Image (cartoon, coloured by chain):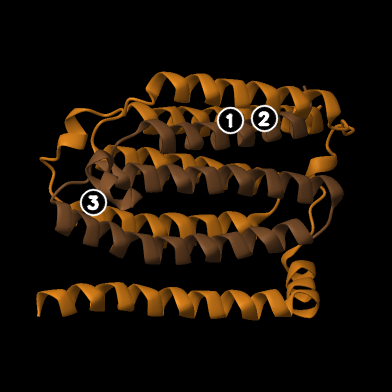
């Protein structure tokens, strides 16, 4: 088995598991962590392709994703804390009035 | 003899850490308490950092540990400790989308892995270890991608301002 295929398969599996976690879990914090898992899967595929083609563009993109993930968490955690303070729960089904 | 043994060990560690990352990801889905989910995610991230190290991009491995495990996950663990542990979402883990979600994710994974296994060009053995170094990366990063670097710094500032604004809205409501 080729290493590239193994690593790309692992990254796809991480992405699919993260997406599954975002869909099926009820806790908002766990959903946020599953989003981080999806970003990690994408990072692994980027690093693999950057190594395969011996280009630095993939590594640059990985760095930009690091920063975007940090910004995402910095803005998402206060929103989650605010929601939890208003509704007194982390259960996503309590936030259905956000549908509008 | 020693070279083939080292290549064998390299592949063995790669498979081990890939398996560890997958086990951590599955544990994230089935564990109940958010703190354990966070620990499983940290284990997955450390396994991914080990894979990056095995691939030869050591600086990305270092930043994976420093930024993701050191900053993002510590922030997440703080948020978990701030919130109440007797939450109904801890007792009942899954939403009613469990069955269609699992079916859809399995179908997506099947299609993606099939595409990856049939369409990817295969490489000669050992070519993955020929890595570019930190010097080459830094020169390319600040010469060709300086605009992206600046844009990302603006994004970080915007995120910090937005976080302060969210907290400020809450304070204003409560007087």
Q: Nearer the viewer, residue B64 or A21?
A: A21
Compared across the picture, whether B131 is left or right of A39 comes to right
The number of discs equals 3
Question: Mark 3 belongs to which subunit?
Answer: B
Q: Nearer the viewer, residue B108 or B124?
A: B108
Alpha carbon distance from label 3 to label 2: 31 Å
Q: Residue at x 68, y 34 (%)?
A: A7
Q: Residue at x 54, y 66 (%)?
A: A67
Q: Nearer the viewer, residue A25 or A5?
A: A25
Q: Secondary structure at mark 1?
A: helix
Q: Are marks 1 and 2 in contact (CB under 8 Å)?
A: yes
- Rendering colour (chain B): orange
Alpha carbon distance from label 1 to label 2: 6 Å
Q: Are marks 3 and 2 in contact (CB under 8 Å)?
A: no
Compared across the picture, whether B149 is left or right of B162 comes to right
Q: Nearer the viewer, residue B13 or B168?
A: B168
Q: Secondary structure at mark 2?
A: helix
**Same chain letter for marks 1 and 2:** yes
**How crowded is the residue under tag 1: few (<14 C-alpha within 10 Å), some, or many (20+)?**
many
Residue B92 image point, x, y percent: 21, 28
Q: Which chain is brown?
A: A
Q: Which residue is mark 1?
A: A13
Q: Secondary structure at mark 3?
A: helix
Q: Residue at x 31, y 29 (%)?
A: B95
Q: Which residue is mark 3?
A: B80
Residue B98 image point, x, y percent: 38, 23
**How crowded is the residue under tag 3: few (<14 C-alpha within 10 Å), some, or many (20+)?**
some
Q: Which mark is residue A9?
A: 2
Instruction: Assign the N terminus of chain A to one quadrant of the image.
Output: top right
Compared across the picture, whether B69 is left or right of B172 comes to right
Q: Is residue A15 above or below residue B79?
A: above
Compared across the picture, whether B59 is left or right of B132 comes to left
């Amino acid at each position: 088995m080729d290493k590239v295929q193994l690593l790309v398969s692992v990254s796809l599996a991480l992405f699919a598991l993260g997406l599954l976690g975002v869909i099926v879990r009820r806790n908002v914090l766990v959903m946020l962590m599953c989003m981080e898992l999806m970003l990690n899967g994408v990072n692994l595929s980027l690093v693999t392709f950057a190594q395969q083609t011996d280009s630095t563009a993939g590594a640059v993109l990985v760095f930009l994703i690091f920063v975007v993930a940090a910004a995402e968490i910095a803005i998402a955690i206060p929103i989650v804390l605010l929601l939890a303070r208003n509704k007194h729960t982390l259960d996503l089904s309590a936030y259905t009035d956000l549908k509008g | 003899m020693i070279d083939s043994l080292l290549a064998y060990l390299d592949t063995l560690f790669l498979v081990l850490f890939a398996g560890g990352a997958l086990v951590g990801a599955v544990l994230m889905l089935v564990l109940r308490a958010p703190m354990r989910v966070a620990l499983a995610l940290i284990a997955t991230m450390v396994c991914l950092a080990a894979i990056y190290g095995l691939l030869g991009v050591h600086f990305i491995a270092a930043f994976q540990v420093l930024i993701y495990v050191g900053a993002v996950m510590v922030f997440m663990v703080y948020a978990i400790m701030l919130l109440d542990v007797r939450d109904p979402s801890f007792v009942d883990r899954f939403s009613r989308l469990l069955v269609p979600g699992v079916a859809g994710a399995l179908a997506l994974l099947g299609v993606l892995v099939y595409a990856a296994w049939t369409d990817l060009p295969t490489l000669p053995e050992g070519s993955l270890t020929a890595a570019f170094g930190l010097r080459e990366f830094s020169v390319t990063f600040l010469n060709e991608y300086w605009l992206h670097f600046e844009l990302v710094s603006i994004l970080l500032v915007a995120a910090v301002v937005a976080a302060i604004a969210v907290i400020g809205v809450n304070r204003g409501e409560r007087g």
